[in-house]
Image (cartoon, helix red, strand yellow):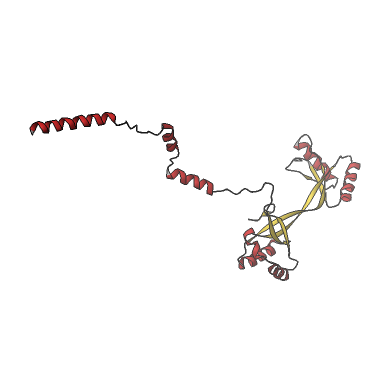
Amino acid sequence: MRWLFLLLLVLNLFYYVWHQQQAPLRVKEVEPMSLYRGQQQNIRLLSEADREQERREVVTPEVPAGVTETCLFLGSFQQESAARQVEQRLMSLDIQGEVRAVDAAAGLDYWVYLPPLASRQASLRQLKELQARKIDSYIITQGDLANGISLGIFPRDDSAQSVMRRLADAGYEPLLRELPRAQRSYWVRIAPQSRRLADDYLLQQLASDFKGLQHQLMPCEDVATLR
């Protein structure tokens, strides 16, 4: 029996070795390194993704170039105090407004003068000479005509020409300069965010309460603000 057991054991060992030699080898497949690196590149931190999402969501609106915003103005008033009354009325209605001054050209003035001489002393001697002849004259103290002599500012050209002829006959060489005459008026500018509250009904009421009140659209920032 012992020999039979040993024989069976040897046969089993022989069969195991033979079976291992006959079995095909299995090759383990490995993914290419390029595919692994490509997957690594597609991995992003959550914070980076969030920042990109925020950049896409935050869009800065572009203001069209050359576009001037217009505002509604109420006026005009010769006195600032009258404009302040309208401003207070609007404030009581929760409408934001502010008083602004508008300077408009209202004609020309004509300035007759003698140009500055070589020195201030020479101009002062000329001034004394003119005053001795009973000619109204004043020394100019500033500007491009400093040390010149002013002979008067006239609202009409013919009046200025008459003075120039009289001075020319006396041996002087006067000059003439035109000065734009500005007329200041006061308007109440309604803030853009309150413009929708200033409807036709309100404008009619204001025109009834404030005689001569008009409304006009003008550039928002081209009118001087009063402090």
- Residue visible at 69% across and 60% down? 72
Q: Which of the image's four quarters has the C terminus? A: bottom right
Q: Quadrant of residue 169?
A: top right
- Residue visible at 76% across and 35% down? 119
Position above or below: 195 against 5: below
**Residue 121 x, y percent position in the rendering:** 76, 37
Q: Which of the image's four quarters has the N terminus? A: top left
Q: Quadrant of residue 15?
A: top left
Q: Residue furthest left?
A: 1
180 or 100, nearer to the observer:
100
- Residue visible at 89% across and 47% down? 161
- Residue visible at 25% across and 31% down? 19
197 or 5, nearer to the observer:
5
Q: Is residue 158 left or right of residue 225?
A: right
Position above or below: 151 against 186: above
**Residue 13 x, y percent position in the rendering:** 18, 31
